[in-house]
Image (cartoon, helix red, strand yellow):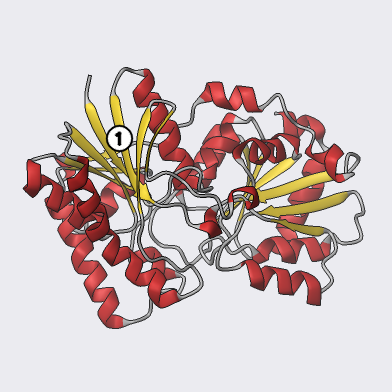
Amino acid sequence: MMKILMVVANFVPEIGSAAHVYYDLAKAFVKRGHEVDVLTSYPREYNLHEKDVGTSFPINESLEGINVHRCKHPSNRDNIVVRGFEHFYIPYYYFNHYKKMEKKFDACLMYIPPLPLYYLAKKIKKYDGTPSVLNFQDFHPQELTDVGILKNPLLIKIMEHIERAAYKNADHITVLSEGGVDYVVNRGGDPDKITHIYNGTLVTDIDNYAIKKDFKIKKGIKDKCLISYAGILSPFQKIDDILDVAKLLVDYRDIIFYIVGDGMSKEHLKNRIETEKIYNVELLPFQEREEYFNIINSSDVSLILLDERMKAPCLPGKTINLMASKKPVIAIVNKDTESANIINESQCGCVVEPNNIDYFKNIVLFLKKNKSMQEK
């Protein structure tokens, strides 16, 4: 048995890829007899289902055998300055909370980003000798500069300095994509300390969720082809491609698109839908996990999108859930990305280049007409 500390900035009841990936992983460790503690932030209302907004959550609690420790700190999604500085001050808040736990661990598994959590791993090791595995799910600052979120030259240099220090000094690093290994090595990482490991999912949970698939009935769209995107709404995903193809298909009354989630791009998408009268697109807020899978299970086709400007190797977190749920995928990604390779190799969907809206439209119509291809 090991005593494992997992550090992640988002954890249940918050909704999102990071929260659920580490929730599943923590449960898997517990099932294998390990003692698991999770150090995370106090739930932020903008990441909660509407029924949980206003709820008071315990700072420390046991959740399905997982010891959850929640740390309160300033947070504001709509203030880009506060949002940026949050990445730099949460290691301080987390470390103060860690010391109060008064517990020694065999290993620490840390979800990156935020990139400055590297300093937390460093402080924990100096404090009591606990080694850390840095689990890089995204590569900052590369992804932030690719899509134009981070433009300040000084901040970019600071982030690049932290990135190089993390790669050079980490006890061990895991990356989601095969290309991520070369990416880290080229920036100073030791290849003997880097491992490629895909995110996992609890297949038993997926099978249990698969029983419920009544979303179409509830929404009165039983006879329509439902195409869904469920996840974060940010510049990384370029959700505008969904609206662009929906406009081309607006006369097809038997096709409807659902975009489910929240994020920086939500108001922009909402305004486009209203001003351009894209009536075949519906926006829904974050959903609880059971309803999230209900939407996936009820969909005819699910979507994965990545902005074509993204140069860093990455793999959208929802990919594993869609594959485990046996849903056909249309992936709007560059054809030379790892996401495209996985979709093509597994033959679980079709790859469309970003901005190729006509081809996107044709693939939608092809899959709508060919149920046998959807099943295949």
Which residue occupies the foreground of this view, 57 or 270?
57
Which residue occupies the foreground of this view, 123 or 272?
123
Residue 308 screen position, x and y as percent: 52, 64
Residue 328 screen position, x and y as percent: 67, 37
At 66% from the left and 35% from the top, the residue drawn is 327
At 52% from the left and 35% from the top, the residue drawn is 345
Residue 351 screen position, x and y as percent: 61, 49
Q: Tell me which corner region of the image, top left, top right, bottom left or bottom right, holds residue 247.
A: bottom right
The tally of labels here is 1
At 80% from the left and 34% from the top, the residue drawn is 214
Q: Is residue 355 above or below residue 368?
A: below
Residue 101 left/right relative to 367: left
Residue 318 screen position, x and y as percent: 54, 43
Q: Is residue 189 above or below residue 217?
A: below
At 13% from the left and 39% from the top, the residue drawn is 130
Q: Is residue 322 above or below residue 72?
A: above
> Under tag 1, what secondary structure?
strand
Residue 286 left/right relative to 74: right
Residue 375 left/right relative to 307: right
Residue 71 left/right relative to 172: right
Residue 145 in sight here? no
Where is mark 1, residue-wise? 37
Q: Is residue 251 above or below residue 324?
A: below
Which residue occupies the foreground of this view, 93 or 259?
93
Q: Tell me which corner region of the image, top left, top right, bottom left or bottom right, holds residue 84.
A: bottom left
Give the quadrant of the N terminus.
top left
Amino acid type, callout 1: Asp
